[in-house]
Image: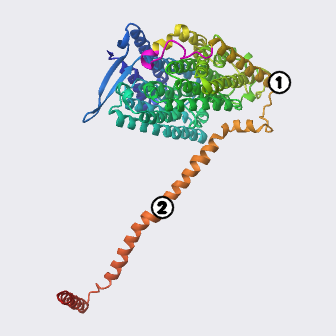
Amino acid sequence: MTTSSHLVYLIALPLISAALLLLLGRKTDKWGHILATLVSASAFGIGVSEFFAMQGRSGDARAATQKIFSWISVGTFKVDASLLLDQLSICFVLLITGVGTLIHIYSIAYMSHDHDRRRFFAYLNLFIAAMLLLVLGDSYLNLYVGWEGVGLASYLLIGFWNQKPAYATAAKKAFVANRVGDVGLSLAIMIVFAQFGTVTFAGVKAGAPHASTAALTAIGAMLLLAAAGKSAQFPLQSWLGDAMAGPTPVSALIHAATMVTAGVYLITRSNFIFDGSSTARLLVVIVGGITLIFGALIGTAKDDIKKALAASTMSQIGYMILASGLGPVGYAIAIMHLLTHGFFKAGMFLGAGSVMHGMDDEVNMRRYGGIGKLMPITFATFGLGYLAIIGVPPFAGFYSKDKIIELAFNAGGTKGIILGGATLLGAAITAFYMTRLVVMTFTGAKRWDEKAHPHESPILMWLPMAILAIGSVATGFLFNSGNSLVNWLAPVLNSRNEVGGEELMKPIVVSTLALLAVVIGVGIAIGMYRKEVPVVAPEKVSVFTRIARRDLMQDAFNEAVLMRPGQKLTEGLVKTDYFAIDGLVRLVAGIFASTSTTLRKIQNGYVRSYALIMVGGALALIATIWVVTL
């Protein structure tokens, strides 16, 4: 393993930039966005330099470490604030800083009229610094610091326009949901320490083969809970749709390309935990399978363009989570889909922002229609992302998502049939709702208000979209060529060259079924939405549509199962505290108060009363002695 002295700059540069923009305040209004963008680009440059340096080394020497300082030293337990850059973390470093820089450039134009643009860019840099710490930390404790930093930055960015109560509420909802997941990560770290006596990835990996299955299952379950919170997976997925309240670049950076992928990183980084527990892997597969269908169904009924894309993100992360439960090669395929998704989904979110920019911030797709003719660049770049996400060859999603479908079928037996069927169904629904989105937005007759004047976005907005669109086309082929990504990640994830274990279903058969599912989904959507689309969503719809519009009742479920019982439990505990615990204290205090009040009456200041008390006391003492001596 190589020692490096440059890794700290990846985190320090955006962190210092964020501090400067926040501390100097209005003095940085004119140049703060430029500084933030240059810093993000510099971090990307360092990441590229480190990547090529890794190419020049072989074996274990490819991984680089840097110790910053000794953090905790208690007896034999020691934790250093150290960074680890290996084949897995470099993928995330390049994604975070590369896509992050494009989003910074896009935001210069998108946020140009915002009075607090400088603060927005400070939060972006804070997020990038926290996310880089999350993926570069060499231990679970270091990861935890970045994990919490990402949660803070997300809260600040979602609620950036917190003068609107609904936006502030959305930020709070995301923060609370993530805190539930954070409890899982905290408990996992505690169990790891109790079981292994260390929290470093290397130490836990070395001890995992000797640990009990029960301990590994408990750790895996808690890590999965943490991943569910950060990556908006069942049952902690309800916050993601509301998080679209933040500026659109936030949706692209946090809720498409980076933050929601943190859960996938946590599971794949902890592959040595999940490899030792089939139960933990099964839980991962179940959560991913449920969520990929859950998110896809929600996406079919959303008229808000950003919320439809958010539901899609939830579903696509579900694919990644499911794949990571089918390891060892599943971990690598999950990362492949994560990287391709980072390009095409970030591009589509920025495309949605471009549409909103030209439509006076209108988000209702029913009030779009025919925009493609007036915004050709936005239409073209969004269209490439659309083809990638539905899995049309040779676009990126075809390579990564088809691999996941293949892994699911090759799980074998009833499990393979269920998982394969779920992934195919998800592909068909994805093709349906994404086609619905494209048709309602870019084609057909115009439905917008006469006050709106849709127009193409400036170059600072469409150039990042174009670059991301190129990634939507090329990345799948590049990552899949010769199993390049699988082989690259093999030293960290123990992935193999072959796609799976026993090949129960041939790749050509899987691709044929997946394309058939896509054709069915696209055909149904075109048949339903090529005709006139009502500006107002019809109220007379099926019960399934009503449920999907309400996010499959996830908020109602959380309220009924978690919030209301939680409130009743809290009320009961408060009453118990008041009447039982405090009541006992008040009883004791009352007895002493009553006794002291009674005794205080004999302190009347009369000498004859005191003399009488003394005589009475003496007689009582004499009587006691007399009784004892009989």
**Residue 162: in magenta span:** no
Is residue 118 shown to the viewer in this render?
A: no
Residue projecting furthest to the front:
413
Looking at the rendered image, the quarter that the N terminus falls into is top left
Query: Residue 14 or 321: which is nearer the viewer?
Result: 321
Task: Provide residue 92's location: percent of width, then percent of height.
Answer: 47, 20
Task: Provide residue 461's location: percent of width, then percent of height.
Answer: 60, 18
> Which residue does the numbered mark 2 point to in the structure image?
576
Task: Provide residue 210's location: percent of width, then percent of height.
Answer: 36, 29
Query: Residue 486 or 227: which is nearer the viewer?
Result: 486
SS assignment for the magenta stretch, majority: loop
> Which residue does the numbered mark 1 point to in the structure image?
531
* Res. 440 image quadrant: top right
Task: Provide residue 154's location: percent of width, then percent of height.
Answer: 51, 32
Q: CA distance from mark 1 to mark 2?
A: 62 Å
Q: Give the residues in magenta.
A: 489-505
Tell me the kind of residue under disc 2.
Answer: Thr
* Res. 458 image quadrant: top right
In terms of secondary structure, where does tag 1 sit?
loop
Query: Residue 295 or 366: which is nearer the viewer?
Result: 295
Is residue 363 shown to the viewer in this render?
A: yes
- At label 2, counting other C-alpha atoms closer than 10 Å, the crowd grade (few under 14, some 14-19, many 20 or more) is few
